[in-house]
Amino acid sequence: MSGPARVTHASTRAAVLDLVRAAGMISRVGLVNATGLTGGTISTVVRGLIDEGLVAETGHAESTGGKRRVMLQLNHFARYAVGVHLDGARITYVLTNLGGAVVARISRAGAGADEPAAVVARVAREADALIDSVGVERDRILGLGLVAARPAEHHEFGRALERATGLPVVLDHDATAAAIGEHWSGGVGATSTFAALFMGTGIGAGIVLGGTTYRGPSGHTGEIGHACLDVDGPRCWCGARGCLEVLAGPAAVVEQARADRALTRAAGLVGGRTRAATPVAADFAAISRAARQGNTRAVALLERSARYVAAAARTLANVLDLEVLVLTGPSFAIAGSIYLPVLRAELDSAFIARDVHPISVRLSPSAASAPAIGAAAIVLQSELVPRRQGLRLPDDLAAEEPPVFQVLR
Amino acid sequence: MSGPARVTHASTRAAVLDLVRAAGMISRVGLVNATGLTGGTISTVVRGLIDEGLVAETGHAESTGGKRRVMLQLNHFARYAVGVHLDGARITYVLTNLGGAVVARISRAGAGADEPAAVVARVAREADALIDSVGVERDRILGLGLVAARPAEHHEFGRALERATGLPVVLDHDATAAAIGEHWSGGVGATSTFAALFMGTGIGAGIVLGGTTYRGPSGHTGEIGHACLDVDGPRCWCGARGCLEVLAGPAAVVEQARADRALTRAAGLVGGRTRAATPVAADFAAISRAARQGNTRAVALLERSARYVAAAARTLANVLDLEVLVLTGPSFAIAGSIYLPVLRAELDSAFIARDVHPISVRLSPSAASAPAIGAAAIVLQSELVPRRQGLRLPDDLAAEEPPVFQVLR
DNA sequence: CGAGGATTCTTCAGTTACTAAACAAAGAAA
DNA sequence: TTTCTTTGTTTAGTAACTGAAGAATCCTCG
C-alpha cells in the first residue's frame, strides 16, 4: 500500500544554492534572513555545498560591530551545461557555467530538410566540439537543454540526442527558455514576476511568476502573438482575427515593406525574389538596418509594429501584474532599440499598477542567443533546483546590505 | 541567531482536507494515490480530522475483491464562514458551511456617503443578524471574508470590522474571490488552471493556476478590463487607449444605449434623468431585460460588447493556457446567456491550444452572489489550507473511480 | 462452511530535516 | 585587558514522514 518515496519539503540545499546564485555574494547570516531557516541548518547545508565544490568562501564583509561575515559565492566553474536552440535558419549552441555565463558559443546552419538521424548525429558532433573547445571534463557537464518554437514536435529528436551524446536532455519552449535564461543570469530578482517578450519570426512570451516558471497545463503559455488587438482585423492562421502576430509580427512588417517599392530597393530585401531559407528573418534584419541608418519609411513601419507590441505588452502586464519586462530573441536583438522606447512609454503611462510599483522594461543584453542560454539555464535549474516551492523567500533580496568586499588573504 | 519558527513542509493535514473537499467523497486509499503519501500517514492524518469533526466516514464502496473501502466525506456543518461583498450599490452577506454551500444570504443597501464608523457598526450588526438567523454557535465561525473592487482602500475598514465582530477578517479583490468561490464550491477540478471573468460595473478576472490562486506581487492581477483591443481606440481613465472596459464594459454599453432614443424608451433607462446610486448597474440590467425580451437593438448592443469580451477572453486563455473559463459577477448574472455563446464560439474556433486540450466556458450557477461566496471561501481556505504548495496533487481527481455508495447502517 | 487470497487499514520502529539553545570564535569598544 | 556584539558551529530533541509487518474485512472456491 505504501506510496512512492518523495521529498515533501522543498529541497533546502537547492533553495540555498539558488539564493547564493541570485545574490551573487551572500553570507550565512544573509541566508538565514533570506530563507527563514535557522543558523544551524544553514551551517550544515553550506558545508555540504562547499564540500561538493559548488560554493566557495571568497572573503569577508566589514564588521558591523562583531565578527565579520564570511562571504559565499557560487563556484561558477564547478559545473557546466549545454544549450541548443533549434531555429528554422540556424542552430545555436552555447556552453555555460553554473552562473549562466557563456563559456563558448557556436552557430551552425539549420536542419532544413535533412534526415532527422543525420541532424541528430550532426548536433551531437557539434555539441561535442563545443565542449572539447574549452576542454571541460565530461562529468562536469550536467546535461543538454534543447529548445525550439514547438517543443512537442521534437520529443523523438531529444531522445535520440540523449543517446547520441550520453547527456541528459531537457526540452522546452524557446520563449520560456529565454525567460529562464534572464532569470538565471541574474538580471531580474530571485522572486520577481516578469515576462520575457520573445520575438523571432513569431511573438511569444516566457512567464516567470514569483521566481517560478509558469508552463501551464499543456505548456502552451505566453502566446501573446495571438493576443487580439483588433476584433475586426485580418484573419490569422490560428483561426482568430486581429492577432498581434498578423498585425505587427516580423512577417507582417516584412510583407508591408515588400509592398513599398522604394523601401524594398533601399533596404535590399531578398524575400520576394530569391526565397532564402528564412526570408522573413533576413528581410526583417534588413529593414531594421535601414531604420537604424535613418530610412524614415523603415522607421515608420517598425514604430507602427512597436505600437501594437506595446499594446499587447500592456495587456500582459495588466493581467499578470508584472514587475519586469525583458525584450529578447533574434528580432529584438536587431530592432530592440526601436521597440524599447515605445514599450517604455506605453507602460509608464498606462500600466494599471504603476502607482503601486514600477514596471521595468529592458532589452536583454544577449537577445540573440537568449534561447540557447536559457536552454542551458533550464538544465542548471532542473539539476540543481528541483523544486523551489514551499519555502519562504525574501521579499526583497536587495535588503541584504551589500557588504564591502575584501579579498581573503 | 535562530530564525522564526515556520512550517516548512506543506501542511499535510490541510492538503488532505482539501482533497476530501474537492473529491466530495474519497477513501483512504484514494488519498494515498492522490497525495503520494503512504497509507500510514494518511491513516493518522484522517484520524485527526475525524477527531476534530471535520471529516466523517459515511459509508462503504463496493469491494474490488478484498476489504471494502471506507468512504470519507467533509462534515459540511462542522465550520462556517461569513462572506461580505461591498459593492457601490449593495452589500451582500452570505454564510457558508465548510463545503462552500450558502446557508443564509442577505443583501442590504450600499454604504453610499455614510460615515465609515457607522458603516462598520451596521455591517457588524447585519453580519451578526445573519449568523443568528440560522443559530450557529459563534465558535464554529472561522472568520469573515471582505471583498471589494479595490481592497487596498478598505484596510482600515477591515480592521475596524475585526474589532466590531470579534471575527478574524480577510480582505481580497472581488474578482479573485469569485474565482476562489468557483474553485471551492467544486465546479472546477482541484488542480485546474482557470479564470473567473468577472463583470460588475468594470471587468476583471480572478486567476487560479494549477489550483493555486494567483495574486501577483501587488495584488493587481487579472485587469483584463484594461486589455487593449484597439490601439487607436478611445482613451480610458487608466491612461491607455482602446481598453476593453471603455469599448465594451457595462458603462460603455449603457452609454451607447442612452444615445439610442428608441432603446432608451423601450428599456426604460433611468440613468440620464434621475441619477440613481448606480445608474450604470440599473440601466445595464434594463438593457439585458430588453434584450431577453427580444428587443433587437438591445441584443445588437450586447452582442457587440460580447465580441470584445470574447476577444479579451481569448487573449487571456492564450496567455495562461486556461482549461476553464467561468463567467461570473452581477452583470453576467443578468446578461450571461447572451455573452456565453459568443465567448464559446470564439474560444472553440481560436483558442490556440484547442487541439491539445479543450477549454470549457461556462456560466457560474451563482453569478450574482459569487463575490460574497468567494469571500467566505477565502476564509475557509485561509483557515484550513494554509499553503498547498510542495505537495504532489492528482493530475485528474476523476481517476478515482466513483464507488457505489451505501449508507452506513 | 471454511481455507486462502485480496485488499484495506493500523501500528510501530526508524529516518530525515529541521529547531532551539548552548557554545565557540572573532572582532569592536572601553 | 575586559566586555560586548555579532557570526558561525555543535548538539540534543522533535515533527512528520517512510517502510514493513500485521490485523481486519471481504470475496472466491473447493
Image (cartoon, coloured by chain):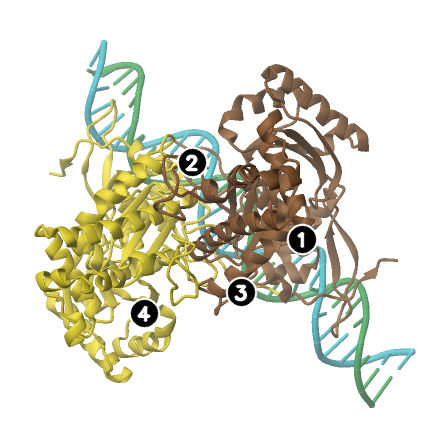
Chain colours: A yellow, B brown, C cyan, D green
Task: Tell me: B177 left or right of A186.
Answer: right
Element at label 4: strand
Mark 3 or 2: in front is 3
Q: Nearer the viewer, residue A325 or B192?
A: A325
* Residue that mark 1 sits on: B20
| Mark number, residue A169 | 4
The subunit letter for the residue under badge 2 reads: B
Task: Please rate how many residues cluster around mark 4, counting C-alpha atoms within 10 Å: few if below 14, some from 14 to 19, many from 20.
Answer: many
Determine which of the numbered discs, if any, sits on residue A83 in the image: none
The answer to whether tags 2 and 1 share a subunit is yes
Q: Nearer the viewer, mark 2 or mark 1?
A: 2
Q: Chain of mark 4?
A: A
Q: Chain of mark 1?
A: B
Choose the circle earlier in sequence order: 2 or 1. 1
Q: CA distance from mark 4 to mark 3?
A: 29 Å
User: Circle 3 sits on which residue?
Assistant: B358
The answer to which quarter of the image holds residue B403 is bottom right
Q: Mark 3 and mark 2: span between their CA atoms?
A: 31 Å
Q: C16 and B196: which one is in front? A: B196
Amino acid found under the numbered disc labelled 2: Ser
Residue A308's x, y, as percent? 31, 50
Q: Are marks 4 and 1 on the same chain?
A: no
Read off the residue under disc 2: B218
Q: Amino acid at mark 1?
A: Val
What secondary structure is found at the residue carrying circle 1?
A: helix
Q: Residue at x 23, y 77 (%)?
A: A111
Could you tell me the amino acid type at mark 4?
Answer: Val
Residue B76 placement: quadrant: top right
Give the total number of marks visible in the rendering. Answer: 4
Mark 1 or 3 closer to N-term? Answer: 1
Location of the C terminus of chain B (image quadrant): bottom right
Instruction: Name the residue type under label 3.
Output: Pro
